[in-house]
Image: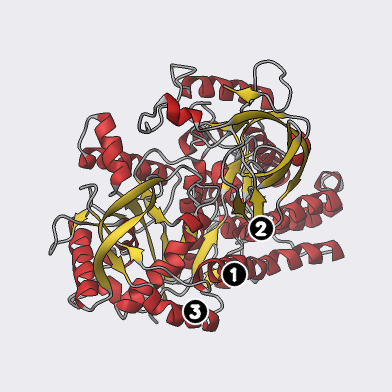
Amino acid sequence: MAKKPYYITTAIAYTSGKPHIGNTYEIVLADSIARYKRFEGYDVRFQTGTDEHGQKIELKAAEAGITPKEFVDQTAGEIKRIWDLMNTSYDKFIRTTDADHERQVQKIFKKLYEQGDIYKGEYEGLYCTPCESFFTESQLVDGKCPDCGRPVQPAKEEAYFLKLSKYEGRLIEYINTHPDFIQPESRKNEMMNNFLLPGLQDLCVSRTSFKWGIPVDFDPNHVVYVWIDALSNYITGLGFDMDGNHGELYNKYWPCDLHLIGKDILRFHTIYWPIMLMALDIPLPKQVFGHPWLIQSDGKMSKSKGNVIYADDLVDMFGVDAVRYFVLHEMPFENDGVISWELLVERLNSDLANTLGNLVNRTISMSNKYFGGVVENKNVTEEVDQDLIRVAVSTKDRVANAMDRLRVADAMTEIFNLFKRCNKYIDETMPWALAKEEDKKNRLATVLYNLVESITIGATLLEPFMPETTEKIIAQLNGTKRGMEDLGEFGKYPSGTKVTEKPEILFARLDINEVMERVEALQAANKPADENPGIDIEKKPEITIDDFDKIQLQVGEVIACEEVKKSKKLLCSRIKIGSEVRQIVSGIKSQYSPEEMVGKKVVVVTNLKPAKLAGIESQGMILCAEDEQGNLALVTTEKDMPHGAEIC
């Protein structure tokens, strides 16, 4: 009987630079799901790749003094190297500069235009270059990009637009009638409440202000904007053809079973992409899962600080499977996970070296010591065996239940619960004590057999997550990986098999002080040569002294401060300025707590026209400095000055 097809994709990585461990997490997560589905018997197609067009690439290539194609060739090669380093089993690595992809994107764009779903107009709005997105004033958060928090610039240009509003009702109905389409549930609510229900604006889908993109073949002054270009990879990578001459893979694998993406690009995959497919009369993907982020425990990763964590550095320090274990096991289902060097060492020592590695080593060593390595089931059972057997044979179903819900971390926990139960079984049966009594020899053999059988079951289930470790364990036991159908039955390990004579240490314990010394050296090497390079910002037009004189700046003292309800970024401060008290709302909550604000002397723009932020009137503006990572620092005076003092 033919295997049931299963198609899984990651988001394609943007080729603006080397991916850090947070970017790498997604490909490892997708790989674990793909491997598990193969283990279940599915015919899996696993696609990943790179997004290689856009203004940001054009600018970075110019800075590097090379062509955009040369730039993306280098970066795509580095991304593919890291994906391969992490032992990911993708079937297709697509690049949006692939000729067949570019041809189909042009056809898709033309088809949408000819049927009236794309029209020509003019875009005037606020543009975020890093996100390559236009926003209206109302969409900004504290005057900045709502996605990345960086500054936006006014932009105006001729553009083509996709009629999102035409399909919003149909998409709302689809989401309501397909409750598993967007996962987790909280992400679905976010898309519905924040974007779909308030109403969609038509989407800009072409640009004329840069050239590094796929040309609109019927209007070559325009290049196809990122969304139609990048999102189409999921079908072009299967051999989709807009003229209907689809390849075998498209007919077999579409619609996609799972788009695995970061939560930050959920809108593009659950609104823009489904509407594009609806307009083209193509079935929608079955599910889109917006996974959380892997963030650093001490704040944002920064190249200037030298603290960016890359997958290849982690692999050099801990090994591939240890890194895979950490990123998969430490990520909650919905909330962001935290990574740090210290936590990595703790998990490796406790879970991998102790729980798993020590279990395998002890079991093989005892088999060699007491029976010359021969593992035999003498069927001398006791009641304590039954609980171990129950846990071993039921682990398969508990793992399956977790994986069906994409709860990968929970699935791994179930497997390690089996290994923990094996360690407990050793403490309960005390093989070293049994070995001292000749009449207990058959009982000892049975205990060791039960351990080897349980480890084999656990190692087999571990393969999607830690494939190299599984291979090592099975090889040391001289066994074979089980099929899914065999994992619910205990006793499949061939009695009389001889294990390896010298067990390999799977994971050596690490000394945290030694690791941190290596980390410090690594971070020092990664820091830019100039410790204080400063920041270049976009220059504004020159002003005269008369222009500057229109701004009134004064020292203010914060006498009270509180969080603005329903806002993640805003604080409301009451600030004494001379004889009056002003209420000022500021987007500084990520950097300052209300308690920290009270008592601070700050510089305030006092003649700014009042404005409402989150429904609260703000009677001025507190001045802050901001670096390229978005860190803020309040502007104050060098010496203590009375509130109300004029800044001149």
* Amino acid type, mark 2: Ile
Q: Position of residue 621 (x, y in %)?
A: 60, 39
Residue 612 falls in image quadrant: bottom right
Instruction: Tell me which numbered mark, 3 or 1, is placed earlier along the sequence.
Output: 3
Instruction: Tell me which numbered mark, 2 or 1, is placed earlier along the sequence.
Output: 1
Q: Position of residue 566 (x, y in %)?
A: 68, 58
For label 2, the residue is: 415
Residues packed near mark 2 inside 10 Å, few (<14), some (14 to 19) or many (20 plus): many
Rendered position, 527 above or below 76: above
Horizontal relation, residue 393 to residue 551: left or right: right
For label 1, the residue is: 189
Rendered position, 264 above or below 316: below
Q: How far apart, in angstroms, are the residues tagged by discs 3 and 1?
A: 11 Å
Q: Position of residue 478 (x, y in %)?
A: 55, 51
Horizontal relation, residue 435 to residue 63: left or right: right
Horizontal relation, residue 374 to residue 128: left or right: right
Residue 192 falls in image quadrant: bottom right
Q: Position of residue 487 (x, y in %)?
A: 61, 68
Residue 354 falls in image quadrant: top right
Name the mark nearer the viewer: 3 or 2: 3
Residue at 57 percent of width and 59 percent of height: 460
The secondary structure type at the circle numbered 2 is helix
For label 3, the residue is: 172
Residues packed near mark 3 inside 10 Å, few (<14), some (14 to 19) or many (20 plus): some
Q: 144 and 348: which one is in front? A: 144
| Residue 10 visible in the picture | yes
Q: How far apart, in angstroms, are the residues tagged by discs 2 and 1?
A: 32 Å
